[in-house]
Image (spheres, rainbow, N blue to C red):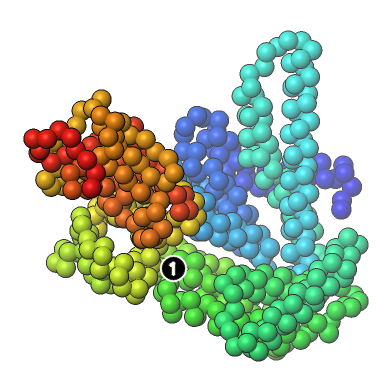
Amino acid sequence: MKPWKDILRRMAHSPRRFPVELVFGIVFFAVACIDDFHEDMLPLFVPVVALSFFLRGANRWLYAASPLLLVPLFFIDFRHFLWTTAFVLTYVLAALLLVHGSRRLANRPFANHVLHVAIATAFGMLVTGLLMLAVWAIVASTDYLFSLHVPDKIYAYTGFFAWFVVAPQVCCTFIHEDEYEEVNVPKVVRLILDFILSPALIIYTVILFAYFLNIVRIWDLPKGNVAYMVIAFVGTALVGRLLQEMLEHRHFAWFYDHLTWIALPPLVMFWVGTLYRIRLYSLTESRVYLLWIGALMTLFVGMLLWRRTRHFQSMATILGMAILLSTFVPGISAKSIGLRCQTRRFKTFVQELHLADATTGRLLPTFDFDRIQNDSTLYAHYEETNSIVSYLKEQMGGNAFDERYGEWNYRYRLEAAAQGRVYFKLDTPLDLGDYTIMLPEKSFYVSQGDGRIDVTREETLILEYPIDSMLKEKPQMKYDAASLHTYRNDSVLLVVPSVSIEGEKAFADIYPVQVFVKPKTNQDVRSK
């Protein structure tokens, strides 16, 4: 690390050395200070600065033109993009741009560059944070001592200036200094690699191998989350293999040099589990990404076999290109493929279940629930259709789904009751049949207890709704709103406006309820 005076001198010259990053910082700082003005673009600051820093070393003309990125940023609404998988992968791309560098590097220099960028970035963020806290402390102390009544927004503006203007200059300066020079590996890094990371990977390998042998013995499929465990294992092992290039004494060379063969059983479990679930449920956005990750893991582990292909910077390039193709190219992006596959399944299931018009493809207002509940296959397909609808609404937006297919207003979800209380509200027309006379509210009394609803009139029980016992006898009722909201005998119809179910117990909103009777001359209406 340069002496502090030299660092401060270089920091003073950083705006001249990184002018585009300064422009981005000032613009984003201004946007952050203006209330309700393009706040959705602020989380994109880090990827934009990472791109400009990369272009600075790659092509000075593109670097000079990179402020033009601000034009689309001001005209695109990013609210639906933020905090999605694509947004997270944008940050992964930003990290790849920083660690990749603008020069072609062999494995050892590339490992040094990755470590240098990580340490410089962390140190730059630390310095910026401490500087911001120092300014806050000075402002707060001055405000308290002299009763200046400093507005609270001053603290927010100071934070914005620190992170949007100061932080990029500090981090870019630290990264740029000795960026491609080989440095000694810090002792703490050697300690982490030799005594924490590598032993943990070996223990994890033993666990995965034991689980692999167990599922082979019982001839079963891997559990669903094993795929993510394999991704974490292989990804961490590849990073560990890269960082081994910097060590003079490689105590775990026997493990990392045979990583290709060690990773085979975990990769087999990954592919078996992933392909099986894709065959059952088709592709979604997350499963498309799983395929991409699986292909990349297999490729990278295979590249370790030969010296000519064992090039980690090329792996970083391939990973970045894969993210671009799978995330931002229309038609072949993970979101597009998942949407097409699940839309096709949705259309197939709704036609099979007779839930949609065969000509228009739009959803029907009513359906034959008895036909579905009495057929286990149709029942399972309806459960899958509910999940598909949730996925399509999440990807398309609820309004877009309703405009295209109609409203999915079937008032039950097969999995909901097992997860907690399910709430149903009567919001569809009700056929009263022969029960055409509505009793005045004060002419009857409704009580609820012991799993039933009682309706009395003139101290006479005219209807008893044993809702809990009915739910035990016919559990499917909890998925059919129409059967929950009404109960009748030969003379009386009870209409309950809202019902909630928790486990095997139902709770009705008995105020207000409506009671209807058939036309009778005798006012003494009794239950059957």
Tell me, yes or no, if residue 86 can be seen here: yes
The location of residue 118, given as percent across then percent down, is 74, 58
Q: Is residue 454 above or below residue 117?
A: above
The location of residue 68, given as percent across then percent down, is 48, 48
| Callout 1 amino acid | Thr
Q: Quadrant of residue 282?
A: bottom left
Q: Is residue 196 toward the left or the right of residue 99 in the image? A: right
The location of residue 205, given as percent across then percent down, is 75, 78
The location of residue 450, given as percent across then percent down, is 44, 44
Residue at 61% over, 81% down: 269
Residue at 67% over, 13% down: 149
Residue at 48% over, 57% down: 418
Q: Quadrant of residue 442?
A: top left
Tell me, yes or no, if residue 23 can be seen here: no
Question: Which residue is more in the foreground, 83 or 310?
Answer: 83
Q: Is residue 251 toward the left or the right of residue 289 in the image? A: right
